[in-house]
């Protein structure tokens, strides 16, 4: 869309940023799989991430978007039954009931604003805007049978995300009560499963956690390779015309992307940091150009391209200066983007008006 509206350069810049975003989201999932496997099998994180990453890459590589969609459906039901239907009520029961959970927790755990208004606002900017323009979201939307299915599916998915988010927050509170001395908070979910569940249910719950992780992993790996192939390789290669050649190319790129994702995961090893980097780049650099492409007719392709470059540089510089966990990057990125677009559009309008006056005088 940005390519059609603002020219090929805008397509390349936004495509690069979107590919980096999808890769970083995939990195979070490989790290999460590593955490799960290290808890379950007592492996070190290095081996756990490699094994988990290879499994996801393999079925994505072999089946493409069809495999991603089919496994998403199966994974949805496993994670719903395992986490919401089984683990949540069992966890509350083991902790002594809802009233006991509330009484044993530090009051700050029950406050919706405990993390602070600035952090809440930053998370809103990161994830709300990011989800609206994420290619991994839209590639699923375009597989819908018709507009009605797309609309209803999107609304139901949004409602489900609220239920799922609250469920995981409560499970986190239960883990804080039942496993108070946990050194690594990323281990909370798998350790809770291993500590409170009977052996017959542990397998199902581990499958549920793996399903939640893998449904994101496969989609974002597929999204990254799709962007690289469709936005960078195919526009420069007119000889590749058959679908078989395109599929073969996409598989090769998917494999290479998967290897890079595993390497970054082994280096970073922090889910939240990887997620913040991903959404800071996406929301800070591309959200406003997308909105401009849809609703701002006077903005030019040159101004939009400069806006994306400036905001991306601002986001990256802030992450370097303040650290990769900085939440200011998204705010500075959005501010620099809107300022660049506003000033650029004003300057273009003034230049256009001046040229018009000169033509009249002539």
Image: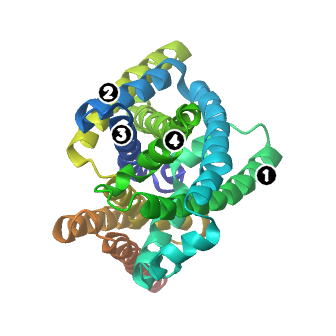
Q: CA distance from mark 4 to mark 2?
A: 26 Å
Q: Which residue is mark 2?
A: 256
Q: Tell me which numbered mark, 4 or 1, is placed earlier along the sequence.
A: 1
Do the residues under discs 1 and 3 have CB atoms within 8 angstroms? Answer: no
Q: Tell me which numbered mark, 2 or 3, is placed earlier along the sequence.
A: 3
**Which element type, helix, strand or loop, lies under badge 4?**
helix
Q: Which residue is mark 4?
A: 209
Quadrant assignment, res 348: bottom left
Q: CA distance from mark 2 to mark 1?
A: 36 Å
Residue 150 visible in rendering: yes
Do the residues under discs 2 and 1 have CB atoms within 8 angstroms? Answer: no
Q: Residue 227's spot in the image, x, y percent?
A: 44, 38
Compared to residue 23, the image places residue 297 above or below, namely below
Compared to residue 175, the image places residue 82 above or below, namely above
Seen from the viewer's position, the closer of residues 359 and 22 is 22
Question: Residue at (53%, 72%) from the top-left corner?
Answer: 298
Q: Which residue is mark 3?
A: 39
């Amino acid at each position: 869309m940005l390519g059609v509206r603002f020219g090929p350069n805008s397509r390349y810049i936004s495509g690069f940023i979107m590919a980096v975003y999808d890769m970083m989201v995939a990195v979070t999932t490989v790290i999460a799989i590593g955490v799960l496997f290290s808890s379950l099998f007592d492996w070190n994180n290095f081996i756990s991430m490699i094994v988990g990453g290879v499994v996801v890459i393999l079925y994505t590589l072999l089946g493409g978007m069809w495999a991603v969609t089919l496994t998403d459906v199966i994974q949805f039901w496993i994670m719903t039954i395992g986490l919401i239907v089984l683990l949540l009520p069992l966890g509350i029961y083991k902790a002594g009931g809802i009233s006991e959970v509330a009484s044993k927790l530090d009051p700050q755990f029950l406050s919706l604003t405990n993390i602070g208004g600035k952090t809440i606002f930053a998370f809103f900017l990161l994830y709300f805007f990011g989800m609206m323009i994420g290619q991994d979201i839209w590639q699923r939307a375009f597989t819908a049978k018709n507009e009605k299915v797309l609309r209803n599916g999107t609304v139901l998915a949004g409602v489900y995300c609220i239920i799922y988010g609250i469920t995981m927050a409560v499970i986190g509170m239960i883990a804080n009560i039942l496993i108070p001395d946990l050194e690594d908070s990323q281990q909370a979910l798998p350790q809770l499963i291993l500590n409170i569940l009977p052996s017959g249910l542990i397998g199902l719950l581990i499958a549920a956690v793996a399903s939640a992780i893998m449904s994101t992993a496969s989609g974002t790996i597929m999204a990254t390779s799709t962007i690289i192939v469709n936005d960078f390789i195919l526009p420069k290669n007119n000889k590749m015309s058959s679908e078989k050649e395109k599929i073969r190319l996409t598989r090769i790129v998917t494999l290479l992307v998967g290897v890079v994702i595993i390497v970054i995961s082994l280096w970073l090893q922090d889910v939240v940091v990887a997620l913040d980097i991903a959404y800071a780049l996406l929301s800070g650099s591309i959200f406003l150009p997308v909105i401009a492409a849809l609703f701002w007719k006077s903005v030019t392709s040159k101004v939009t391209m400069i806006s994306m470059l400036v905001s991306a540089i601002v986001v990256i510089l802030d992450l370097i200066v303040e650290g990769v966990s900085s939440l200011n990057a998204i705010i500075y990125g959005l501010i620099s983007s809107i300022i660049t677009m506003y000033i650029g559009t004003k300057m273009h309008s003034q230049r256009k008006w001046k040229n018009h006056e000169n033509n009249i005088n002539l």
